[in-house]
Image (cartoon, helix red, strand yellow):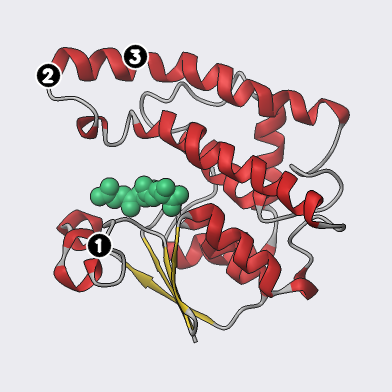
Amino acid sequence: MLKLFYSPNACSLAPHIALDEAGADYEAVRVDFKNGEQRSERYLAINPKGRVPALVTDRGILTEVPAILGWVAQTYPAAHLKPEGDFFAFSMMQEFNLYIASTVHVALAHLFPAERWADSAEAIANMKAKVPSNLTALLGLIEDRFADGRPWVMGAQYTVADPYLYVMTRWLERDGAGGSAPFPRLVAHRSRVQARPAVQKVLADEGLEPV
Ligand SMILES: N[C@@H](CCC(=O)N[C@@H](CS)C(=O)NCC(=O)O)C(=O)O
């Protein structure tokens, strides 16, 4: 059986939702961040990066959200979690997911944990102050994408890109992120994602409330 190592409301929420949507046979294993379990010897043996998510498969361990999302979408074709079409269509979805991982997630990570990036209180305060304006620019591009009335990131079809965007728009409500008011289309997308039964189940499993 697959094993997903996660922490509640972390980026691992996206692959957690994707596995559930796919109908995969998996066990979700909580990593206790409060006690620093991600840096324990036991967990570092699973993921030497000391981060979640990590997905244990019968072929080995996969880390990095876009890699896991792409694997889930490819491994469970009957769940239709990737755009219909050829490898170009798949790569368009991966382009989106990599933008989230390399740019949007990193921008938000300057809030939590800000201490990763700087030591002085002044530098940390400066970095945190920049986060909302950075997000306005970065997420503004995604807000524009929905101007054509599409329900999902890739168009008419729900894909693994949707729960990934959902995690980012959940985080907008965290202290210092600036809130979701500038992004009405992303808020509507967030509501659509949250209305899905698999999402409601996974939120309950992680002990989270809808936002
Ligand atoms: N690039 C990685 C980022 C993973 C990551 O930063 N995970 C965070 C949670 S969202 C984490 O495990 N943080 C624990 C820590 O930094 O100690 C990915 O996309 O999977």
Count of numbered badges drawn on the protein: 3
Mark 1 vs 2, N-terminal side: 1
161 sits to left or right of 105: right
> In the picture shown, does residue 171 fall above or below 85?
above
Residue carrying label 1: 32
Reading the image, the residue beneath label 2 is 120
Q: Amino acid at mark 2?
A: Ser
Q: Label 1, label 2: how many angstroms apart (C-alpha)?
A: 27 Å
Amino acid under disc 3:
Ala
Q: Is residue 10 visible?
A: no
Local packing at callout 2 (Cα closer than 10 Å; few below 14, some 14-19, many 20+) is: few
Percent x, y for residue 114?
Answer: 26, 30
Mark 1: amino acid: Asp
Residue 33: percent from the left, percent from the top? 24, 56
Q: Residue pushed farthest front?
A: 87
The 10 Å Cα crowd at callout 1, few under 14, some 14 to 19, many 20 or more, is few
Residue shown at the point (20%, 15%) measured from the top left: 123
- Mark 2 or mark 3, earlier in chain: 2
Within 10 Å of disc 3 (Cα), the crowding (few <14, some 14-19, many 20+) is some
Q: Measure the alpha-carbon separation of dots 1 and 3.
A: 29 Å
* Along the viewing direction, whichever of 14 and 68 lies nearer the viewer: 68
Q: Which residue is mark 3?
A: 129
User: Up-down: is 191 above or below 33?
Assistant: above
